Amino acid sequence: LLAGLEKLRDEPAETEDGQRITLQVNTGLMTDIVRSIERGAEGVGLYRTEIPFMVRDRFPSEEEQRLIYREQLSAFAPHGVTMRTLDVGGDKPLSYFPIEEDNPFLGWRGIRLTLDHPEIFIVQVRAMLKAAEGLNNLRIMLPMVTSVIEAEEAQHLIHRAWLEVREEGVDVEMPPVGVMIEVPASVYQARALAQRVEFLSVGTNDLTQYLLAVDRNNRQVSELYNSCHPAVLHALLHVVEQAHEEGKPVSVCGEMAGDPSTALILMAMGFDSLSMNASNLLRVKAAVRQVNMTFLRRLLNEVLAMDNGEVIASYLDLQLTKVG
Ligand code: PEP
Ligand code: MG
């Protein structure tokens, strides 16, 4: 199967009637770089910076971080690399920074933690900026944002870090800053957030978890975890509309983007780019190249009129099998 798909590596992700979409990869480990380049990724839509933090037994220094980030940025240049600031807490523990909470998913995680520890945040951003010197393909993305206050505070710290490194002689442009939409509050703040940042990216893994109140890692309730639930689909549509009304690009970097049937629905909604694990990229590209926008828009209208998430999921699978 993969042998057949490999020939698509340098072909565009374009429908039969010429609609293009940018396909990017989610990375974290060094090994993801090679696999992504092999599959012709158009940059990185989500670099999970917490992964190099999680595999260590102490916080990496600014210089250690700079070297790690440089590898990502230089491997994908001139394509953009979207680096998410440290997203620990919840399901992502750091052994050397223990957090004890009754409700970790509703607790101290993502941007909340780094805004309370600006010294961690600033060191990370400084390392990113230094790593981007001479390449300027860095984009910075903020996880778990629930309010414009958090976005503004983080932007302020990023700007401060940028002034610092410039002062020290590092020749780097101020990178675009974006926020993840992955909690219900940010869905309804999408316009206000889009007005303040350069791009939005929907984290459908957490967004599904929080909209449906279903722990993404709890097997007991895994049957209830469904990104095709109408609440999720309508939230996604709302986010695209709000972002585009503000003239800002919007992507999806959750697992939904890497499943051909849901990826096509996201394309129909108008998302500008999809970011996925490298292993899914060519399958998604193959699916995109086999459909046209008339078919996709009709499919989208059909599923938006349905009210049962399980029916929607199986209907999409069925439609895709017909296409493929
Ligand atoms: C998400 O929540 O959809 C996402 C992409 O981030 P993570 O899976 O790392 O929480
Ligand atoms: Mg997330």
Image (cartoon, grey):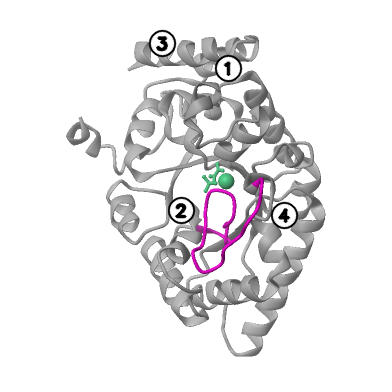
Residue in the picture at 36% in, 64% down: 75
Q: Are marks 3 and 2 in contact (CB under 8 Å)?
A: no
Task: Please name the amino acid that badge 2 sits on.
Answer: Val
User: Which residue is labeled 3 in the image?
Assistant: 318
Q: Earlier in the sequence, mark 1 or mark 2?
A: 2
Task: Please name the amino acid that badge 4 sits on.
Answer: Val
User: Which residue is labeled 2 in the image?
Assistant: 44
x and y, in percent, of residue 249 in the image: 63, 44
Residue at the bottom extreme of this rendering: 168
Camera sees residue 201 = yes
Q: Is residue 96 magenta?
A: yes
Alpha-carbon distance for marks 1 and 4? 28 Å
100 or 309, which lies in front? 100
Alpha-carbon distance for marks 2 and 4? 18 Å
x and y, in percent, of residue 141 in the image: 61, 56
Q: Are marks 1 and 3 in contact (CB under 8 Å)?
A: no
Determine if the C-beta at disc 3 is less than 8 A from ligand 1. no
91 to the left or right of 258: right
Q: Earlier in the sequence, mark 1 or mark 4?
A: 4
User: Which residue is labeled 1 in the image?
Assistant: 300
Locate the N terminus and report the quarter of the image it occupies.
top left
Alpha-carbon distance for marks 4 and 3? 38 Å
Alpha-carbon distance for marks 1 and 2? 27 Å
Magenta segment: 81-103
Q: Earlier in the sequence, mark 2 or mark 4?
A: 2
Q: Secondary structure at mark 3?
A: helix
Q: Secondary structure at mark 4?
A: loop
